[in-house]
Every structure is written in structure tokens, then in C-alpha cells.
Amino acid sequence: MIPMIRNIILTISVIFVTFIVVRWQLNEQEHIHEGASEHAQMQEDYPRGPHNGRLLREGEFAVEITIFETGVPPEFRVYPYYQGQPISPSDVDLSIELGRTGNVADRFAFYGQADFLRGDGIVTEPHSFDVTVTAAHQDKTHQWRFESYEGRTIIPDQLASEASIGTEVAGSAKIIETLKLTGRVEIDPNRVSQVRPRFPGIVKRIHVELGEIVKAGDTMLTVESSESLQEYPVKAPIGGLVIKRNVQAGEVTADAPLFTIVDLSHVWMELDIFARDSGRVKKGQTVTFETLDGHTGNGIIDWLSPLSSHASQSIHARVPLDNPDARLRPGQFVRADVEIAEHDVPLAVRRSGVQGFRDFQVVFAKFGETYEVRMLEFGISNGEWLEVIGGLAPGTEYVSENSYLIKADIEKSGASHDH
């Protein structure tokens, strides 16, 4: 009785401690979210000018900061004011510095155009930075600093580890380009045998049934010869599955086959290739396949049909397959990936790390406990890797596993794309 009571008390204690730890973690995470939400709200709670931009004022001088991106790449356009009225851009000397994660700084000089000052470069995504604005007017220099974050969140390393958020460093990769095809498992005609009697006669006894597995040399039936009246056995020429039986005891044999045996230890996979892809598939290419019941395997294309189907204009590719356990059944549908090219690319990310964000495909770069979006441009890809041709610096640590958790945390924090 005492050991039982001890076990009950121990179990209750473990449950209580676990509950306290989980609640503490949840409270800590909520505190982080609340702080991020308050921070996002503070970003949006600022004075705006006539062009809906951020209005920065010191004394009687002010500038309105906007990012213009209608029909052009994103660029700074700054409108200057004095005593509440627009003034000539030529009267103002302006510069902006953007501090980004990873200790990167973008600097912009400005020149006058129409009624605004136009930045001399593109404001690249993400529009998430610490901003320093310096403006000189009438021999007086003004400077403002503010934060403008989007697609950014902070998650303590311990919580990230407990959530199984995995990262890796973006670098080179070997991308195997594949073509998706469908097809069927077919019987290898070289492994089909039709069983016939050596001499005509009467079938006396049948020793095997339809659907049985036989070995080469097994007696399949006994026949009494019409000439010698002697009985002789008819044996299986190959081992395999009996798929047809065309005989009954007492019947007289003729030239027709009595049984058909198929050796299913080796089969063919026939893939359908549409005309538009026929030039991309070649003999010797590797094929990875999967059946509808989840069986997977691979093989090599050893033959391409010289003829095309009249109806679909497709051709067939043949892939011989070993099938020792008979998992592959003739007539079975298969999905296949054919390796049609191999590319060594200088920069790639795992597909598992990519998420949708606004109108972009992104990964989340990691800087200490800070995570921030990186909008990507992609090149070639396969099921595992995506070539990156823009938007990410080589050597950047990014989230490759459970990246959807980062996306959810950013969306909850409310960090917006606000200009």
C-alpha cells in the first residue's frame, strides 16, 4: 500500500511541476508577443504629413519621409517644410542611413526633383531597419532616429529549441532537376512461360491451381499419351505465379497452352512521356518512383519507345525493376521522378524553410534571438532545394525546420509594412 501511495504522490508532483513550467513558458512568450505588439503599435503611432508619410519636426523645420513604389522600385521621396509650408528641395541637404540586421548599413544621398528630395538608390526588402535622418537647412543641422520594423520577431533560444525550430547556413548545393511522370507496372515478357504437353493425350491429374506459386521443375499435371498410353508429367519450365489455367482433368490436350506462368521477381515499369518532354528524357537516367500504397524504389531507363500513342502522342520509357518480394504488381499505378539534369548552384535554401509573406516567398534569417524575413528570388529547384538568385546573402543562418512557427509569431506580433 505504501509504495502505491508513494507512486501516486510522485505522479501528482511531476504533473504539478510540468504545469508550472509550461505556464511560465507561456507567460514569457505572451510577454514577448505583447512587447512586440506594443512596439508595432508605437511604430504606427506617429505624426503623418500630407503624403501620408512619417513627419519629423524640429522647431519650424520638418521633413516628411515616404517610400514610393508605384510603378518603380521602392525609393525614398522626402518632402521638406518650413513654418508649415512646403519649401524648395534645393534648400535642403539630406541623407538617410538604414541600419539592418547583420550589421549592414544602407546610405542614401538625395537630390531635388519637382517638390521633393529623391533618394539615389533602391530601398531593398525587407523594409525593416533603424533609421537615421540628417537634414541641413539654413545653416542648421537636424537629426532624427527611429525604428521601422516589419517581418521581425524575437524568440529566446530555449523556446526555439523546445519548438524544434531548426536552422542552417545558406550556401552552395547540388540541385538535381527532375521531371514528374506517371506510369504502370508491367509484366516482363521475357519472364512469361506457356505450359504445353510434349505429346497429345488425356489429362489424368492436375497438381496445381490458378494463383499458386510454382518452382521450375514442379509437376503441374499428368497426361496419358494417346500413342503410348503411358502417363508422363508436364513440369513447370520456370518458377513463378500461375496466372492462367486452360485445362480440366479428363480433357484431351491440343496445341493450346494449358497454363501460363509469370516470374514476378523482375518486372518492368512503363512511364508515359508527353511530346513536350520527350527531348528531356534519355536512356540511362535515374528514376525514383512511388506506388499508391507507399512503396518506393528506383531504377534506370533502359529503353525509349520509337513509336508514340496515336491518341495522346506520348511515348513510353521502360525501367526494369527487381521485385524479389512481389510488392510490385502488374497493372499497378506509379508516380515517378526522372533525374534529367544536375546543377551545382552557389546559393540555395531548403524548400522546407520557405513560407509565403505578403506577396513574397521568404525565409527567416536568424541573428542571435532575432528572426527577420528575407524576400527571395528563385532559380531552378527540386523537391528539396531552391536556388536563390536574390534576396539572401551567402552564409546567412536561416530557419529550415518548422519555419511556419516563425511566420505565425511575426503575424501575431503585428509588425507591418508601413511607409
Image: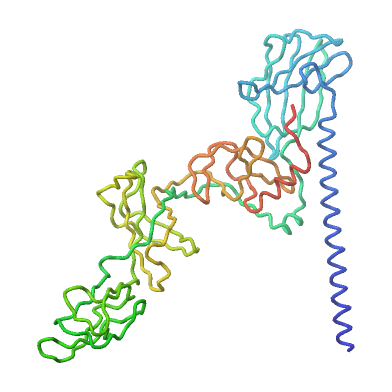
* Number of numbered callouts drawn: 0
The quadrant of the image that shows the C terminus is top right
The quadrant of the image that shows the N terminus is bottom right
Q: Residue 251's spot in the image, x, y percent?
A: 22, 81
Q: Tell which of 314 and 283 is nearer to you.
A: 314
Q: Is residue 85 above or below residue 268?
A: above
Residue found at x 40% / y 72%: 326
Q: Is residue 289 above or below residue 38?
A: below
Q: Tell which of 324 and 211 is nearer to you.
A: 211
Residue 386 lies left or right of residue 158; in this view the side is left
Residue 314 lies left or right of residue 257; in this view the side is right
Q: Tell which of 412 and 207 is nearer to you.
A: 207
Q: Tell which of 13 and 242 is nearer to you.
A: 242
Residue 2, quarter of picture: bottom right
Residue 49 lies left or right of residue 315; in this view the side is right
Residue 122, quarter of picture: top right
Q: Is residue 364 above or below residue 229?
A: above
Q: Is residue 51 above or below residue 45?
A: above
Residue found at x 88% / y 73%: 13
Q: Residue 313's spot in the image, x, y percent?
A: 32, 44
Q: Residue 345's spot in the image, x, y percent?
A: 48, 44
